[in-house]
Image (cartoon, rainbow, N blue to C red):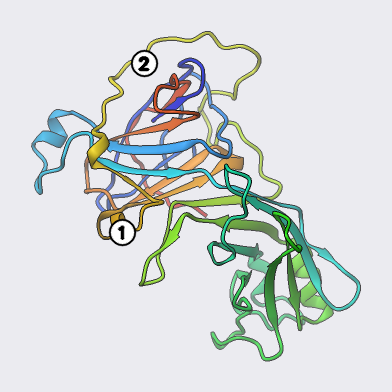
């Protein structure tokens, strides 16, 4: 993985597991090498097959330098709060690089709290509840929506700020919502099957830096540039942009967790060596962070 933003400060690559999955800066994944870099909105995550003996011998054949690209979405939120009128409210912002709003049907707010399940007074049967433009979902123990509950999501007038509101919850459930983790998800496009491509998940309360023991610390002051230890090679014609609907049939899933500087990758060929380049600015922007290693067992939370 390589991060471009004014000079190379770290480097690494990774190999997918038997399911085509790889992650960086998360337990079970690979570390950044020299320094754990920051990931911010508008950084472009580029995942490509490396030119290695392993990849050249892979069956089925993979195209060296091909892969997928996703842009880190500018989505943020504040922690959920009880509004005192029987609702729980979340405030946030979702903005494109040109200053426009992200389409509302490409946003979702979630509250994640495993305590929802089995807590005294709770009717909620899943670890999360969701708010979106279609009314959201608060499922009960039978797997169906709890009657009278809703999770609405709407922009505030013409602004890029939004408000999510959960209603129909009892006092015990509202307390559990406030105690849970607030997340806002923004993605670049949705397929006809409902799959979300180019996903960014902003997690309130999380912080950047090393995601597992033994990984290097985050940037502390100026870090001198250094040359990358592996070529930054890719084929532009074979790089599938998550923003382009024409790429849907072949696009792999790249999910960015900017608050934890962590990236999850799915859908690539099993047992192949990947390079993940995170760019800031145009394609000529210099590399500032990469990652190298082999995939261990684990999945994102």
45, above or below 115, in the image: above
Towards the viewer: 226 or 73:
73
What residue is shown with label 2?
Answer: 228
Query: Which quadrant holds residue 249?
Result: bottom left
Give coordinates of residue 46: x percent, y percent: 37, 37
Q: Is residue 163 left or right of residue 83?
A: left
175, above or below 241, in the image: below
What residue is shown with label 1?
Answer: 248
Local SS, label 2: loop
Q: Is residue 77 left or right of residue 74?
A: right
Q: Find the distance from the CA under tag 2 to the CA under tag 1.
A: 31 Å
Give coordinates of residue 294: x percent, y percent: 32, 35
Give coordinates of residue 213: x percent, y percent: 53, 32
18, above or below 144, in the image: above
Q: Residues within 10 Å of mark 2 (few under 14, many from 20)?
A: some
Towards the viewer: 159 or 240:
159
Q: Residues within 10 Å of mark 1 (few under 14, many from 20)?
A: some
- Which residue is drawn at the image coordinates 76% and 83% (left, top)? 168
Give coordinates of residue 83: x percent, y percent: 87, 69
- Which residue is drawn at the image coordinates 38% and 50% (left, top)? 242
* One can see residue 277 in this view: yes
- The quarter of the image holding the N terminus is top left
Mark 2 or 1, closer to the camera: 1
């Amino acid at each position: 993985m390589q991060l471009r933003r004014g000079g190379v400060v770290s480097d690494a690559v990774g190999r997918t597991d038997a399911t085509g999955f790889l992650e960086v800066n998360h337990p079970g994944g690979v570390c950044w090498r020299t320094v754990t870099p920051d990931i911010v909105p508008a950084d472009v995550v580029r995942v490509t097959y490396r030119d290695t003996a392993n990849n050249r011998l892979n069956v089925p054949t993979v195209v060296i330098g091909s892969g997928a690209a996703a842009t880190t979405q500018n989505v943020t939120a504040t922690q959920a709060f009880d509004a005192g009128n029987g609702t729980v409210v979340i405030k946030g912002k979702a903005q494109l690089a040109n200053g426009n709003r992200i389409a509302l049907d490409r946003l979702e707010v979630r509250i994640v709290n495993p305590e929802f399940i089995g807590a005294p007074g709770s009717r909620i049967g899943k670890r999360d509840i969701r708010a979106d433009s279609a009314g959201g979902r608060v499922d009960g123990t039978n797997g169906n929506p709890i009657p009278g509950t809703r999770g609405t999501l709407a922009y505030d007038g013409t602004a890029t700020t939004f408000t999510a509101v959960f209603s129909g919850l009892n006092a015990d459930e509202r307390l559990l919502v406030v105690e849970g983790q607030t997340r806002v998800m923004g993605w670049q496009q949705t397929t006809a099957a409902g799959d979300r491509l180019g996903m960014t998940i902003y997690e309130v309360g999380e912080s950047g830096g090393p995601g597992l023991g033994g990984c290097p610390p985050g940037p502390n002051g100026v870090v001198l540039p250094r040359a990358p230890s592996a070529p930054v090679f890719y084929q532009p014609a074979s790089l599938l942009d998550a923003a382009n609907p024409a790429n849907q049939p072949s696009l792999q899933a790249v999910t960015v967790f900017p608050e934890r500087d962590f990236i999850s990758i799915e859908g690539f060929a099993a047992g192949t060596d990947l390079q993940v380049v995170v760019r800031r600015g145009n394609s000529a922007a210099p590399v500032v962070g990469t990652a190298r290693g082999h995939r261990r067992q684990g999945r994102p939370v």
